[in-house]
Amino acid sequence: MAPPPNTRLFAWDGLSFRVPETWCFAAYSYQTKHVARVELEDDYTIRLEVEWIKPRRQVDRDRVQKKYSKKAERIGKQANRSRRLHRLPKGWGGNVFTMNDGIEVMSAYYLSPDGEICAWFRGHFSKKDPEKAESIIAMIAKDCDVHTKGMVPWNVYDVAFEVPATFRLMRTSFHAGRKELIFIWRLRKYRIWFFSLAEIILRDNELLDWAVEYLNADKYLKGPIFYVKDGEIRSRRTWRYPVGHKEEIGRMSYRYHVTCHHDAEANQIVLAVFQHRRKSDLLQLPRPALP
């Protein structure tokens, strides 16, 4: 079935759902490694806040409903009136609150069937907004999916990829034309970049030569020297760090697996470096990344 028109898929750290295409990723934070929070905005203000927990043990629905009731009660004290959200799928519940200034606040919760994720959604709607609270939460609930095993999708801005569920996000760097996400798995580091306007980059450069130049200029890759051989990007030790850079020593990871490809349809260059210890570590990566 085709997705609703004028919408986009948003996927972040184990949770995915559809939102209006005018809503963009604004911010994220982690209270702990088990609690994530994101904000989505349009051209004017924050439209949706989402917080979700990956409990260490399964939680029951009554506990979730009590916690949600406390959150909703805090909003309700500031509202003129409220109405319950009906016809939501199993595992969902929520309300819409009308504030003194006419702004509507949608507050909803979701507990996945196996209890592996519990999420709270808070949306903001003015009278001028084309979207309505009930239709937005219905769309979110319809396509909301949980990813806690196997390969986990990440979809934000114009970036879409997958990493294993065991990889934990360490840091991001989002700039116009260049986006980078860094993941950690058992001290191994996985860095992935997405470069926009690939046709401009490749106008005067060969893909792998350009990638090698970029990697060798990266201030966080001090241990190896990268070069092209037999159509692949390889690495060797640099004379400055004959026994390894301090980060390599600390991670006990001296090997680098590099992939680079041109996505012509998306007009992107996708570059990834997996700093690892042994060849068997590469089994963690998606099959196309294997040699």
Image (spheres, grey):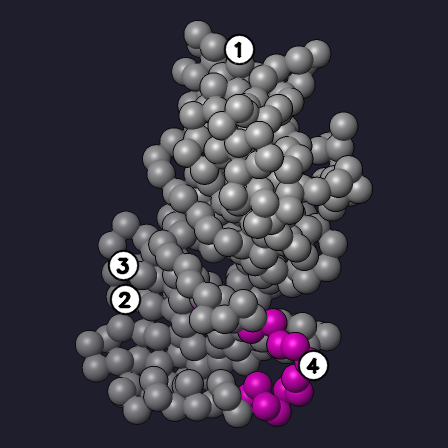
What residue is shown with label 1?
Answer: 206
Task: State the residue at coordinates (44%, 31%).
Answer: 218
In front of the other: label 2 or label 4? 4
- The amino acid type found where label 2 is placed reads Ser
Task: State the residue at coordinates (64%, 37%).
Answer: 254
Secondary element type, mark 2: loop
Determine whether label 3 and label 1 are within 8 Å by CB: no
What residue is shown with label 4?
Answer: 58
Q: Report, in whole angstroms, how far the alpha carbon at label 2 lies from the one at label 3.
A: 11 Å
Q: Report, in whole angstroms, how far the alpha carbon at label 1 lies from the one at label 4.
A: 51 Å
Q: Report, in whole angstroms, how far the alpha carbon at label 2 lies from the one at label 4.
A: 37 Å
Determine whether label 3 and label 4 are within 8 Å by CB: no
Say if residue 231 shows up in the picture.
yes
Q: Report, in whole angstroms, how far the alpha carbon at label 1 lies from the one at label 2.
A: 50 Å
In front of the other: label 3 or label 4? 4
Q: Is 64 contained in the magenta span?
A: yes
Secondary element type, mark 4: loop
